Amino acid sequence: MFKRIALSVLAALLVVSASASVFGATPARGGTLKVSASSIQQLDPYKTAANDETNICGLVFDPLVIISKDNFKPMPHLAQKWETPDENTWVFHLRKGVYFQEGNEVFKKGAKREVTADDVVYSIQRFLKVSTAFTLGDIKSVKALDRYTVEIKTPVPNPFLVADSNRIPSVGIVPREAIEKLGEDGFARHPIGSGPFALKSFTTDQGAVLERNTNYWLPVYLDKVEFVVIPDPTVQILALTAGEVDIVPYLFNLDSMATVAKNPKLTTLSRGGSYRGLGFNVTKPPFDELEVRDAISKAMDIDAAFNAVVAPHGERA
């Protein structure tokens, strides 16, 4: 039996079925994992900020670097190592023998199309042209030094280039020929990457089915992952409780958390890495004045707000 999980954006919780082993379990190959989704419109990783679409793209595509779920530090992925010869230069050394998914409109079965430095350059340059490119920060240039080495230069020192999950870790590497053959819209419906799962089918706002990438360079235990669109958060929890889905990735309200907490078959685990707060645009009056910001801060009862909204599912900063 799969762990039945619900993840709360508000409190960053994982809810796991108590009937399944949570810690220390030995992975077993096979099976289909069913995940609820609120909406799925398209699957181009550079053109979405939607949570459900991002979850799917995270399985289809691989980035150079990933962020550890344990300590939130950057870890090697497609890039097996990197160095900074000077404060404005990053050099990434790619892992050899990583291939794009096969058996699709672009790469036939057995094509063995390897991921190279040219793919990384193309991917970053393409990312820099979309509306979400600001998340990368300033990049002066990106070029391939050889088949497996990429150099990125920034106009100023950018220590967060690999440490911020919204920067290099967010750039899934794509093959140029897939976009050239399928077109922008076609690629958004039939994405091809080098990730652990390949897209089998996708219907807008109904769902998507992913199949295990048999050529993946790391072990992949599941056969399939199905994303089932259930727009109503309350119905998502009902589906989780009934075993119709195995994961509800996001809980959007306190009522859902209360429902989950009352279910003896579910156990909550903290994922961490999430925060909530109020910010000021300090470039515009009156918030450009420290005295105004300080007065607002002192007028708010942060402890009361925390206890009403977050506790006991988080910690006060």
Image: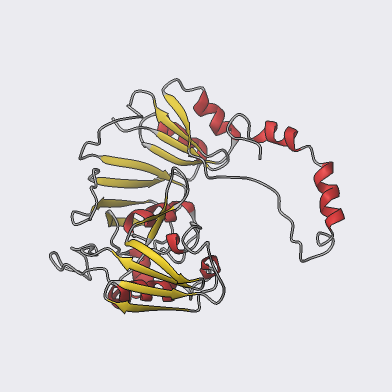
Q: Position of residue 215 (x, y in %)?
A: 19, 57
Q: How many numbered discs sit on the rendered protein?
A: 0
Quadrant in the picture for the N terminus? top left
Q: Residue at x 31, y 41 (%)?
A: 33
Residue 212 position (above or below residue 269): below
Could you tell whether 54 is left or right of 276 in the image? left
Q: Residue at x 63, y 31 (%)?
A: 311
Q: Residue furthest front?
A: 85
**Residue farthest to the left?**
110
- Residue at image position (28%, 61%) is 194
User: How far from the left and from the top, in percent, is residue 14?
Assistant: 46, 35
Q: Residue 14 or 160: which is nearer the viewer?
A: 160
Residue in the foreground of this view, choosing between 89 and 285: 89
- Colour scheme: secondary structure
User: Which image quarter holds the C terminus?
Assistant: top right
- The extreme top residue here reads 264
- Depth check: give the residue in front, 75 or 189: 75
Residue 262, compared with residue 231, is above or below; it is: above
Is 224 positioned to the left or the right of 66 in the image? left
Residue lying at 32% horizontally and 72% vertically, measured from the top left: 149
- In the image, residue 72 lies at what x, y percent? 47, 48
Q: At which x and y percent is residue 30?
A: 20, 40
